Image: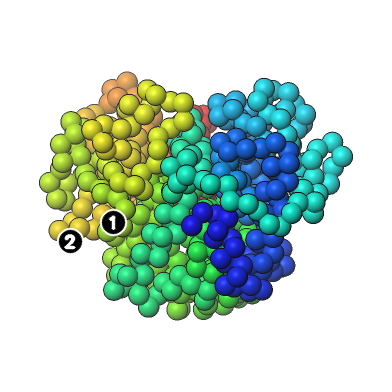
Amino acid sequence: MDARELLIDAADKYGRKTAYIYQDKEYDFQSLRDNSFRLANSLLDLGFRKNDRIAIYLPNCIEYIYSYFAVYSLGCIVVPIDFALSLNEIISISNHCGLKGIITTADVKFSLFELKSRISSLKEIITIEDDSRYISFWGLVENGKNDLADQEIDPQMISSIFYTSGTMGKPKGALWNYEHIHLGAEQLKYFTTYDYLKTILRIDESERTIAAVPLSHSAGILFVMTTVKYGMSHVIMPRFSPLDFIRMVDKWKVTGVFMVPPMYYAILYLKEVESYSLESLRWADVFGAPSSYDLMMRFQKLCPNAVILNGWGMTEVIPPISASSPDNIRSVGKPVPNVELKIFDSKGNQMPQGEIGELVARGKSVFCGYYNEPELNMEAFKNGWFYTGDLGRFDEHGNLYIIGKSKDTIKVGGELVWAAEIEEVLLKHPCIKEAAAVGVPDELRGEVVKCFIVLKEGIVLPKKYVMEYLREQLSRFKLPRHIEYLEELPKTGSGKINKAALINHHE
């Protein structure tokens, strides 16, 4: 079924049950269908048609959800834009994809008139506030009909352009078709067939998650499609705050969470965390970046009834692709049937079991390519395989282990150093809150390791003690030549550490 049919079916099946919670207000399935269809009909009245690109530039909110459903019900193309991006970044993305409309807020730090003047294809600006200068989002909802005709959407039509967060460089527009928007929810359901997850993941109306990652992220589609497919409900966080997170989990009895590692770390270091009960949580899935085993085990102690899962997926390989067993969270588990994964060396040969190489993928969960980037696509796709840029290995049981990014390796005098290995060691130190390792140029060795460290509040730790600690844990060639303390590490909109910003950082 397409998004329109799913909305109709869910409203009939779940009616007045809660679909979303936003700012302490509950929104039911019938309201979800009616308001999404009213918005869709009003967009038709404005002249939007199949394949038109419509951006959503908002923090997480109920309007984001309605926008996704309305645009997908019409066969238009959603361009979710990270709300942390600047005016120039938005203009660059919009001109790159030929944006026709944008759903946003008047509460931005730049002029929406300037935005429109610098995007030649942009026809309509819709704001969630009533502002006479722009088209009112809620005016469109109020004036539209709540019965939408079938738009005859082909599953192979392009549904979305996700501009990647660019942790290591310039954002790229990843294309999804209309089949892809269903796959994440279907793959999540598939995990319930695993023996070790059958009693943990229910993936039905009894589940309630919390949308802490941005809805602009490719994983944000899970908070859209699992609602209408399975009756799951979701609490929407406008932006991630560790204190708000534990309050919402406690108040709304959240059963499961998907988050990136820095979000878990922020919760662990929250002084108030032990004042709240997290006993409703049955599972917590970490994804998006290599995580520290020790820190995830500490998070589990906060949640007496939850198991910790380690998962993998990426914008280009529709997440979630895998989930670990609770007793082996160093691994990200085995892939779903929609995708085939292998480990290749630099010459395109499959690596023996246990050896590290680049993770490659093929199958229907692989995206359609990068929009308007022929050279990049030739580099990323070879002989039918998509080269993910992630380094990994498989064990004898077929479990996948993610080592890091291929661009996140540091070549020190011919020796390869995995940044994730150094970071995990640093994060075990009792005084260190956050850490990142990058490679910086060096005349003698080509590259050397530089570590950026955020200390816990009130801690003073001379760098020489950090070096003494690392010497006990790491080989000599892996040791950093430079250590820099920061108040905080730069993050992308999805909460990952922004390595590109650190590489370009100067003391």
Residue ID for mark 1 = 337
Percent from the top left, x then y, of residue 422?
34, 47
Specify how the rendered protein is coloured.
rainbow
Asked if residue 416 is positioned above or below residue 265 in the image, the reply reads above
Could you say which is closer to the camera, residue 89 or residue 3? Answer: 3
Residue at point 51%, 38% (across, down)? 161
Residue 248 in sight here: no
Residue at point 41%, 72% (across, down)? 201
Asked if residue 386 is positioned above or below residue 6 in the image, the reply reads above
- In the visual, does 94 lie left or right of 428? right
Q: Is mark 1 on a helix, strand or loop?
A: loop
Residue 95 in sight here: yes
Which labelled disc corresponds to residue 79? Answer: none
Q: Quadrant of residue 9?
A: bottom right
Badge 2 amino acid: His
Percent from the top left, x then y, of residue 234?
58, 65
Percent from the top left, x then y, of residue 160?
52, 41
Badge 1 amino acid: Pro
- In the visual, does 263 lie left or right of 471? right
Could you say which is closer to the camera, residue 474 or residue 370? Answer: 370
Residue ID for mark 2 = 397
Percent from the top left, x then y, of residue 432?
46, 54
Residue at point 46%, 26% (across, down)? 372
Q: What element carries label 2?
A: loop
